[in-house]
Image: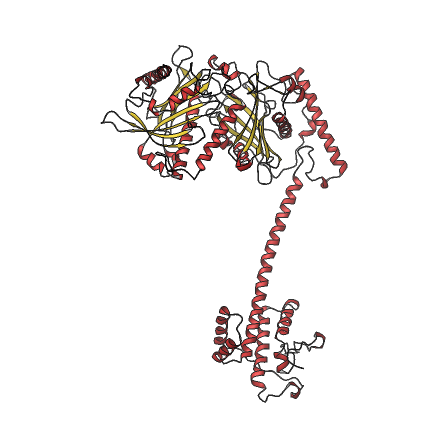
Amino acid sequence: MPAGVMVPARNMPSMIGTNGNVSGFGSSSGLTLGQPNMMEDQLHHLDMTQNISESDLARIRDHEFDSTNTKSGSDNHDGASGDDQDPRPKKKRYHRHTQRQIQEMEAFFKECPHPDDKQRKELSRELGLEPLQIKFWFQNKRTQMKTQHERHENSQLRAENDKLRADNMTYREALSNASCPSCGGPTAIGEMSFDEHQLRLENARLREEIDRISAIAAKYVGKPVVNYPLLSAPMPPHPLELGVGNFGAQPGMGGEMYGAGDLLRSIGAHSEADKPMIIELAVAAMEELVRMAQMGEPLWMSSLDGTNAILNEEEYIRIFPRGIGPKPISFKCEASRETAVVITNHINLVEYLMDVNQWSTIFSGIVSRAMTLEVLSTGVAGNCNGALQVMTAEFQLPTPLVPTRESYYVRYCKQHAAGTWAVVDVSLDNLRPSPAASCRRRPSGCLIQEMPNGYSKVTWVEHVEVDDRGVHNLYKQLVSSGHAFGAKRWVATLDRQCERLASAMATNIPSGDIGVITNPEGRKSMLKLAERMAISFFGGVSASTAHTWTTLSGTGADDVRVTTRKSVDDPGRPPGIVLSAATSFWLPVPPKRVFDLLRDENSRNEPHYSCLQWDILSNGGVVQEMAHIANGRDTGNCVSLLRVNSANSSQSNMLILQESCTDQTASFVIYAPVDTVAMNVLLNGGDPDYMALLPSGFAILPDGTTTTHGGGIGELGSAGGSLLTVAFQILVDSVPTAKLSLGSVATVNNLIACTVERIKVALSCESI
């Protein structure tokens, strides 16, 4: 038979002899040499079907090729063909390669696994082997490497398959425990019969009907008459449920906590029977919020100037008869709606609202304290969709003349469509009635819609019922107009803070302007320090339950109120006794004029116009701006570093960090002296958390009488007056255990009185 002709498998003799050795395909060397590929296939077949160990396989292959090569190179010296050989089986001689030969071929294989004829002949001369032996050894080596590679790939695929199977089982278990929020059944309809699913939907409808009847009955008996006995059974364990998470609170939540109000101290942990009611209340509140954000007349009526939406309370009760019960006696309703486009991604905005720390930081001018009491769900699919948490918060106005509003509520987040989210708050006072409660949040929150280029459209609804009898007459008009705590203030604050965040993350800062900080790390550190300064200012000027104000004088609206606190082990404040003093008063000029005067560094101590000098702390020195960071569209939104060049050569110059910010509803000028060495470190990217600050400043609000731009900060020359709050924080003693002296209080009182007088004179000079 000529070389290279394939022999059918059924005519082939067995490759494994009776003694277990591998034989060739025939006694003819030409036929054997003509079938190398078949030999590889057969050896591979033996490896896959007869479970021969790797060591045995390698030994068999070496014996086969060594025997064949030795026979072709040594046994057939006479050149006889296969037909001339004795057909009786002969005992074959085996020749194993030497260690050196194997090493040389291994090294050559790494460089060239497919040698050509010339390379094989050269290698055979070096090793003393036949070229065919070289050829077969390389073929065998390639087959061996291919088998090892396939075995390694199989192991990897098997491991990945096992991991996917485990993940699949985890997801199946999670889905089997999930429940539908509308009917309480499994989330997948296929896991229950059609009739059972219909019964559950009917049960949910009847439950809503019971809620409606219970709300109507509550108007007459003063409390709900139904407690859902069928719903109090333990719910199946949900994989997304968490235990109580107290952030920044002492264990128990019922004991004494620093700065805790009466409402917070009266709140206890929820029972398992309360959780289904909380979930149902949150789902109903979400539906109400979305409808209130999208509906127009007759639910929302336009104001006379067309700038505000006014809620029709009768229509509201007709459309939403359930709710959280009737309005308590002596409570007033405040309802407002506002829409704006803000420069932030909708997903990031949802995360800001659902993180209590980020939320309270962004709205630090409105939220004085906030805490998550319990997390009922963290959401699904790795985002906030379905997140549910019980919270308490205290809402403030930057003045000691308006009491803060404490609220105990549940916050619920839901994705309604691609790119559309909603976050709603609703009070839980009906579950934990408290005589200290002075504010109830009906469904309030925002509808967020994705916009192109990373923007988001926000429709904010703020709907509360509040007892405002404690509000000072100076702020009655502003509070009753809804601008003090309404949707316009929330949206304006959000818009300004989103611009601030965008400025902090900006990288293309023009370097042409003098004084502009272009170092990214320095910008972030300075903005972070200014943010902490603003939070400290807001916390020290409001009527928060965290501290008690004491009135020093009895002259009416211009009373100076003081409070003290001890600073110990706080790297953000100098140690000792800190005295905070504040006063609020009315000015017959628009808020924008007051803001422009106070934020201008030249007006602190203007050498040419002495009547414009309001800053006593500058002590006659010339104030010069060294650096600034613009953080908004309005030129008034800026963080500046000011230097006070002392008029006395024996005194060192002083640095002042100042932030000025303004929007339609409020303006602030906040500043604090800073250490020169520490500020140089900060501008190079240092940590701002360890720089001690005692901020002072001004809060400027409209008086609520003007309708320009919806009663907000109007243009220069617009009608309406301003409500100005002046506040100072001063370290009166560096020893925390020291007693507060009356002299220190008198000094601060005189400081505020003199500053107020100078501001009034400066505004009078401007009008001349």
Name the image colouring: secondary structure
Q: In the displayed structure, would residue 687 be above or below residue 84? A: above
Residue at 57%, 40% in the rendered image: 382
The answer to whether residue 559 is left or right of residue 229 is left
Quadrant location of the N terminus in the rendered image:
bottom right
Q: Between residues 229 and 466, which one lies in front from this camera angle?
A: 466
Q: Between residues 211 and 315, which one lies in front from this camera angle?
A: 315
Residue 177 placed where, x, y %?
65, 40
Q: How many marks?
A: 0
Quadrant location of the C terminus in the rendered image:
top left
**Residue with the most extreme top position:** 555
Q: Between residues 494 and 298, which one lies in front from this camera angle?
A: 298
Q: In the displayed structure, would residue 747 be above or below residue 11? A: above
**Residue with the most extreme right position:** 195
Q: Is residue 470 visible?
A: no
Residue 621 placed where, x, y %?
28, 24
**Residue with the most extreme left position:** 650
Residue at 65%, 76% in the rendered image: 16
Q: Quadrant of residue 618?
A: top left
Residue 47 placed where, x, y %?
63, 68
Q: In the displayed structure, would residue 487 be above or below residue 76? A: above
Q: Is residue 578 visible?
A: yes
